[in-house]
Amino acid sequence: MWWGNNVFEYDRASLVQLLGGVHRALEQLGGVVSGVHPGIRILATEQNAVQQDAMRMLRVRLWAAAVLGALCCLFFVIWLIRRRARTAVDSN
């Protein structure tokens, strides 16, 4: 469920206004980046406890994948820089 709806602050956000004329999805991205887009909250009940746990685990997996992806990109960039430096030294 959406947690609140502050349309006046949302519509006044400069990033929302800037991207709103381009595409609706970009407008929403601007709202998220600006911090004015309402968050989503779970209506927790006993009946959906299993789904809540699954969503928590999904969040952990997504964060882990993002961190591992960032580390892989960092190591790749470092490897490229070292390779170019080594190639430059070998060519001289």
Image (cartoon, grey):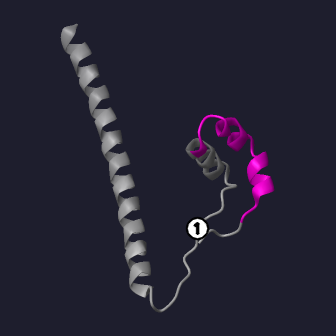
Residue 10 against residue 24 in the figure, above or below: below
Residue 64 against residue 31 in the figure, above or below: below
The N terminus, quarter of image: bottom right
Give me the residue at 51% from left, 89% from top. Answer: 45
Give me the residue at 53% from left, 84% from top. Answer: 44
Decide if residue 61 is on the left or right side of residue 20.
left
Q: Position of residue 31 (x, y in %)?
A: 65, 50
Give me the residue at 27% from left, 33% from top. Answer: 79
Secondary structure of the residue carrying numbered label 1: loop
Tell me the residue that label 1 is attached to: 40
> What's the amino acid at mark 1?
Ile
Within 10 angstroms of label 1, few (less than 14), some, or many (20 or more) residues?
few
Q: Which residues are magenta?
A: 5-24
| Residue furthest out toward the top | 92
Q: Position of residue 10 (x, y in %)?
A: 74, 52
Give the quadrant of residue 40: bottom right
